[in-house]
């Protein structure tokens, strides 16, 4: 791996961590505890569109682990990994099928992230009633996905390919 690529990885992971920290400082005013806007998804989108898919996956994984170790715990890492992996796969498929705009790909990611987290919550807490949160999460994932997708799309249009 070249020094330039290592620097790009480092910058994107650092940016994702800063966005995660900012998001953690926002007051919890959502219907479902733990809901976030998913600002770090902007970084994953940029990496997905401006780097190789493998690079974007690595950046996403490193970000999830570092954010959980820095600001969270084992359970937050579990939730983030489930949501992050499912989200990444949905965004990758959406991007490759070329039927979605950047905002559409982001929406797929936001919705998939929420589904992944609910699945982990149901499994960890052994409580199927948590699935009742899913409609709220899907609606929120749709809105947050559009927001982060529009922002990510603006950045993608302005940035050159990174790798």
Image: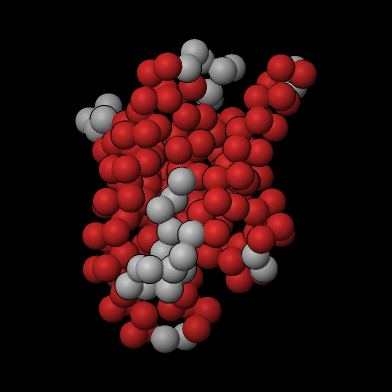
Q: Work out whether 109 lies above or below 128.
A: above
Say which residue appears at 31% left-offset and 34% top-offset.
150
Residue 11 lies in quadrant: top right
Residue 94 seen in this snapshot: no
Compare residues 65 and 38 and report the one nearer the observer: 38
> Which residue is painted at 75% across and 17% down in the image?
2
Q: Where is residue 93 in the image (x, y as percent from the top left)?
A: 36, 37
Question: Which percent across, then down, holds residue 48?
Answer: 47, 30
- 127 shown above or below 151: below
Q: Vertical placement of 56 versus 83: above or below?
A: above
Residue 104, horizontal then vertical, whole percent: 27, 38
Q: How many marks?
A: 0
Q: Residue at x 65, y 65 (%)?
A: 72
Q: Vertically, is 59 above or below 124?
A: above
On the rendered image, what quadrant is the N terminus found in? Answer: top right
Quadrant into which the C terminus falls: top right
Choose top left, top right, bottom left or bottom right for residue 97: top left
Residue name at image x 47 percent, y 17 percent: 159
Looking at this rendering, what residue extends furthest in the top direction?
A: 160
Expressed as whole percent of the image width and height from the top left, the position of residue 42 reads 45, 38
């Amino acid at each position: 791996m070249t020094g330039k690529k290592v620097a790009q990885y480092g910058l994107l992971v650092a940016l994702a961590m800063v966005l995660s920290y900012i998001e953690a400082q926002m007051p919890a005013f959502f219907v479902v505890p733990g809901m976030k806007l998913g600002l770090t998804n902007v970084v994953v989108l940029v990496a997905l569109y401006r780097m190789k898919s493998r690079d974007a996956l690595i950046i996403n994984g490193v970000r999830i682990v570092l954010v959980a170790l820095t600001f969270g715990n084992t359970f937050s890492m579990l939730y983030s990994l489930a949501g992050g992996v499912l989200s990444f796969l949905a965004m990758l498929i959406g991007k490759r099928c070329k039927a979605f705009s950047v905002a559409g790909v982001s929406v797929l990611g936001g919705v998939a992230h929420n589904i992944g987290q609910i699945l982990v919550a149901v499994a960890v807490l052994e409580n199927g009633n948590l699935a009742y949160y899913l409609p709220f999460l899907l609606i929120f994932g749709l809105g947050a996905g559009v927001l982060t997708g529009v922002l990510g799309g603006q950045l993608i249009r302005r940035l050159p390919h990174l790798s």
